[in-house]
Image (spheres, rainbow, N blue to C red):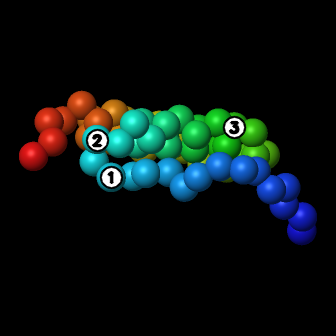
Amino acid sequence: MLHEYVDGRDADLSPGSPDVPLVPDTLVVLNEALTRTPVAFRLSPLQAKAASLLTEELP
């Protein structure tokens, strides 16, 4: 298996990070691009949970 090197940084998943909302969106894009199986992984519950968590006030 070969992997292409992509220059970048790790996502910052700490509360309030601007990277956090991008993670569920990225998972959806990857799922659509890479999943070609009869049983597709359903990301809508994950998206809904992420959206609810991202709209909550931080302590």
Q: Amino acid at mark 1?
A: Ser
Q: Looking at the image, is mark 2 or mark 3 earlier in the sequence?
A: 2
Q: Residue at x 15, y 42 (%)?
A: 58
Give the label, 2 or 3, closer to the camera: 2
Q: Secondary structure at mark 1?
A: loop
Instruction: Say whether marks 2 and 3 touch (CB < 8 Å).
Output: no
**Residue neighbourhood size for the residue with mark 1, other residues' Cα within 10 Å, grouped as few (<14), some (14–19), many (≥20):** few
Indicate left or right for 41 with 22 as reference: right
Question: How much space separates mark 3 and mark 1, taking CA atoms?
Answer: 26 Å
Q: Secondary structure at mark 2?
A: loop
Indicate left or right for 38 with 9 as reference: right
Residue 51, position as x, y percentages in the image: 34, 33
Q: Secondary structure at mark 3?
A: helix
Which corner quadrant holds the N terminus?
Answer: bottom right
The residue that mark 1 highlights is 14
Q: Looking at the image, is mark 3 or mark 1 earlier in the sequence?
A: 1
**Residue neighbourhood size for the residue with mark 2, other residues' Cα within 10 Å, grouped as few (<14), some (14–19), many (≥20):** few
Indicate left or right for 28 with 5 as reference: left
Instruction: Say whether marks 2 and 1 touch (CB < 8 Å).
Output: yes
The residue that mark 3 highlights is 32
Q: Amino acid at mark 2?
A: Gly
Q: Nearer the viewer, residue 10 or 55?
A: 10
The residue that mark 2 highlights is 16
Indicate left or right for 40 with 53 as reference: right
Q: Amino acid at mark 3?
A: Glu
Q: Nearer the viewer, residue 20 or 47?
A: 20
**Residue neighbourhood size for the residue with mark 3, other residues' Cα within 10 Å, grouped as few (<14), some (14–19), many (≥20):** few
Question: How much space separates mark 2 and mark 1, taking CA atoms?
Answer: 6 Å
Residue 6, position as x, y percentages in the image: 76, 50
**Dividing the picture into quarters, in which one does residue 56 lie?**
top left
Give the label, 3 or 1, closer to the camera: 1
Question: How much space separates mark 2 and mark 3, taking CA atoms?
Answer: 27 Å
